[in-house]
DNA sequence: CACGTAATGAAAATGAATTTCAAAATCAAT
DNA sequence: ATTGATTTTGAAATTCATTTTCATTACGTG
């Protein structure tokens, strides 16, 4: 897959080594469409790579973020989630405060307005995060 | 001041006690317009109340948030900041990745669009946070 | 002012994330 | 393929923010 090649290229460019553990983590993670906690990912990888340690999962996720193939998400849960980047499509999130469900949304008008806000305040924008909290259709009532 | 009365009222309604430490923390914090880390606030309060412990600062901030007089801010710094709520005016933040400067902004169109997004996805919105990251006028170049 | 309850603060505990370090793995150059 | 310099791994230790514990002290209602 293309993204895995990107990761290999990133490692090579940085003089880092390709290892069985890194490759297993990256190829598992990158083909999913999910907001993983490190714990969740660790347990999934454990099935493929039983000797894996948390440190390696943390370290590989850091590399994936640096390479642009993953993003960090902080939904006020007290820990960080990591999401594979698909097709460079940016999106924001709605988080259900009851069941924890995460819904993605994209709104070009909001993005555009954010750019305008930054320009008005003479700010050079690099990225943003926007999280809406509430109750999903199933949990509200 | 009005907000301090609100805090007293909140404590009383919940059957909690007014104490010297709580009152000192609340009155100092509420009259500022700043995004405090717990450490910063702790050191400021220490000047007024030398025996204060971190636990009391944490506990009082939690009460201030519950009472609606403070909000939590998480700017990806690895710790939480707390901001006094002034006049019920909601706003979002721009954070400079170099100098750490925090700029507030308010954009009603963005707020309105967020409400629409939530409605379209059948989500009952309670709150949101939107943080723009980049470089401020002084740090960009 | 006495009593029941709540709050305080020092220290210990927790939990996420990072670092350490000895052993193992990678990979470029032979 | 073998070597050898260098990086990576993983278990355990460490860090750091935050929470909890618990004996002592303070509050405030009756």
Image (tube, coloured by chain):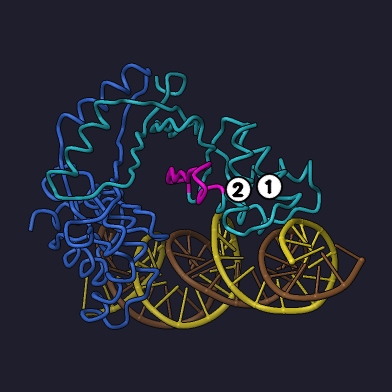
Chain colours: A blue, B cyan, C brown, D yellow
Label 2 crowd (10 A; few <14 / some 14-19 / many >=20): some
Quadrant of the image occupied by residue A136: bottom left
Front residue (pair A112, B105): B105
Asked whether, in this view, residue A97 is left or right of residue B63, the answer is: left
Location of mark 2 (residue): B38
| Mark 2 to mark 1 CA distance (whole Å) | 6 Å
Location of mark 1 (residue): B42
Highlighted magenta segment, given as a residue range: B64-77
Question: Is residue B9 positioned above or below A24 on the image?
Answer: above
Q: Residue at x 50, y 36 (%)?
A: B85
Label 1 crowd (10 A; few <14 / some 14-19 / many >=20): many
Instruction: Quarter of the image for the N terminus of chain A: give it.
Output: bottom left
Front residue (pair B121, B104): B121
Is residue B62 rendered magenta in the image?
no
Q: Tell me whether marks 2 and 1 sit on the same chain.
A: yes
Question: Is residue A120 positioned above or below C19 on the image?
Answer: above
Front residue (pair A105, B88): B88
Q: Are marks 2 and 1 in contact (CB under 8 Å)?
A: yes
């Amino acid at each position: 897959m293309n993204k895995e090649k990107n990761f290999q290229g990133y490692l090579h460019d940085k003089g880092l080594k390709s290892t069985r553990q890194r490759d297993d983590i990256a190829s598992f993670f990158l083909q999913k469409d999910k907001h993983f906690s490190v714990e969740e990912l660790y347990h999934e990888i454990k099935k493929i790579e039983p000797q894996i340690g948390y440190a390696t999962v943390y370290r590989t996720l850091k590399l994936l973020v640096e390479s642009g193939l993953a993003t960090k998400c902080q939904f006020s849960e007290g820990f960080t989630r990591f999401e594979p980047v698909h097709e460079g499509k940016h999106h924001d999130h709605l988080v259900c405060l009851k069941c924890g469900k995460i819904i993605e949304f994209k709104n070009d008008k909001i993005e555009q307005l954010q750019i305008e806000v930054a320009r008005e305040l003479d700010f050079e924008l690099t990225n943003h995060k926007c999280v809406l909290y509430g109750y999903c259709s199933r949990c509200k009532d």
